[in-house]
Amino acid sequence: MLTTSHDLFQASVAGVQTRLLEDFRAKEAARFVAERPRSQAALDAGAAPWLNGVPMHWMRDWPSPFPMVVKKAKDARLTDLDGHKLDDFCLGDTGSMFGHSPPAVIRAIRRQAVRGLTYMLPSKAALRAGSLMSAHFGNFIWQMTLSATDANRNALRVARALTGRRKVLVFNGCYHGSLEDTMVELHAGQTVARAGLVGQGFDLVEGAVCVEFNDLEGVATALAQGDVAAILTEPVMTNSCMVLPQPGFLEGLRALADAHGALLIIDETHTQSTGRGGYTGQHGLAPDIFVVGKCVAGGMPTALWGMTDAVAKRFQTYDADRPSGHSGMGTTLAGNPMQFACLEATLSKVATPDAFDHMDTGAARLAEGLDAAIAQAGLPWHVVRVGARVEFICAPGRLLNGTQAAAAHHPALEGAMHLGLLNRGCLIAPFHNMMLVSPVTTVRQIDRLIEAFTAVVTELKGGTHA
């Protein structure tokens, strides 16, 4: 990835000379290999049965020469097979946002494990968890899934059923899991299927329209066609270079959805970092359907989607009148009792107001430190924070949309930085420049990341860090 990036054919990348970048990357790659003989030996011995040597293809997307092999993870610390202890700010790309293996979740797993792992019926924890979800995220009528991809898929099925319309409106550069319906982008102002999709069997443009984030006029134009069932959006664009909503944009989406008979679906899978209740709760948003996943059950694969009471009643009427048969919604293992045990434990004992206060304070400290390091190095970059989620972006100023976010993404530079941070004991998300502060992340860990970041950017600029 690093050696084939278009960035490396330029004299400089986002304020960093290409020569210095390549020298740094080569040195850090050699260091990584030299310091991880056990991980490499384990991969050599056991990776052959897996496609490309890994259980999931994206495990090859880390910027290191080969994936680390993890021995254990606890709190905000990860230990690899070679004994390196890493301050973990990736936290499973939000899946472990509250820290690895919170004690309350461990206890819940132990209790439930002897009571059964799956049985397609509710438990008492399931009944309690529904009330906790509503207290935490708002008064929605809930359903459980295994992933946010499935939650978004089900939410779109409901929207299409209620409106009789086919299309979903999404934003250029969005990510809502591996849901096919949303794998579109803008090209020369037209909605097209994203490049690189594997085995795509039908025309995605028939079911989706793509608009730039923060463009209410574009949204209005698309909705005016009368064929959009729902707007599906994150309140803040994530999973690339983070894009914040401009004042009034999200409220404008609500008004336009109402005016054109579409539903508004807000996907808070990543933006739970904002605080208790997510961005929706913190900013008083009013979606018709609310989606949440990843860390909601403390790391147990879980996601939920919730409808307002009005939408739920409409769907119940539709559901009662439709022909009997397969709904196309739900999987056998979704809603298993282990999920509910972990969900209840997380919402009642882990994702507390005090936990979010700790996360917010720590993330503010981190953002301030990164800003100072960028200014000291004289780089044209900036830092964005949404609650506990912090990102450095290798471009000046705030981004407005997905096109600007794509232009601000520099894989060669970012990969080298990630590898440099990893070699200095700090792990951040591999697909973008995201760092999370958990309730168990310490001030010392935050300061170590700031120190490592300062050292990396100083060296990339040709200096030395004391």
Image (tube, rainbow, N blue to C red):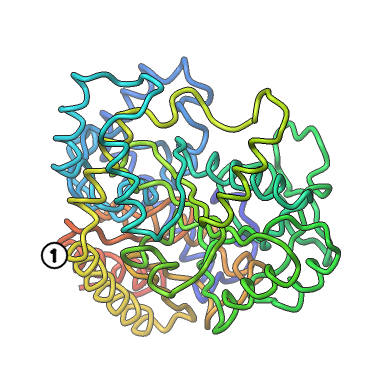
At 32% from the left edge and 75% from the top edge, which residue is drawn? Answer: 367
Classify residue 275 by image quadrant.
bottom left
Closest to the observer: 414 or 165?
Answer: 165
The kind of residue on which mark 1 rests is: Arg
Helix, strand or loop for disc 1: helix
Relative to 147, 349 lies left or right: left
> Where does label 1 land, which residue?
444
Give the class, few, some or many, for how many residues have Cα within 10 Å of label 1's Cα (few <14, many ≥20).
few
Closest to the observer: 137 or 427?
Answer: 137
At 76% from the left edge and 61% from the top edge, which residue is drawn? Answer: 186
Query: In which quadrant of the rendered image does the C terminus lie?
Result: bottom left
Closest to the observer: 301 or 229?
Answer: 229
Q: Position of residue 121 (x, y in %)?
A: 38, 24
Relative to 378, 408 lies left or right: right
- Indicate whether 295 appears above or below 361: above
Q: How many numbered badges does the structure rendering display?
A: 1
Closest to the observer: 87 or 65?
Answer: 87
Q: Position of residue 174 (x, y in %)?
A: 61, 58
Q: Position of residue 109 (x, y in %)?
A: 21, 31
Q: Position of residue 282 (x, y in %)?
A: 38, 72
Relative to 227, 5 lies left or right: left
- Indicate whether 82 appears above or below 229: above
At 45% from the left edge and 46% from the top edge, which residue is drawn? Answer: 142
Relative to 75, 140 lies left or right: right
- Indicate whether 263 appears above or below 315: below
- Indicate whether 426 appears above or below 46: below
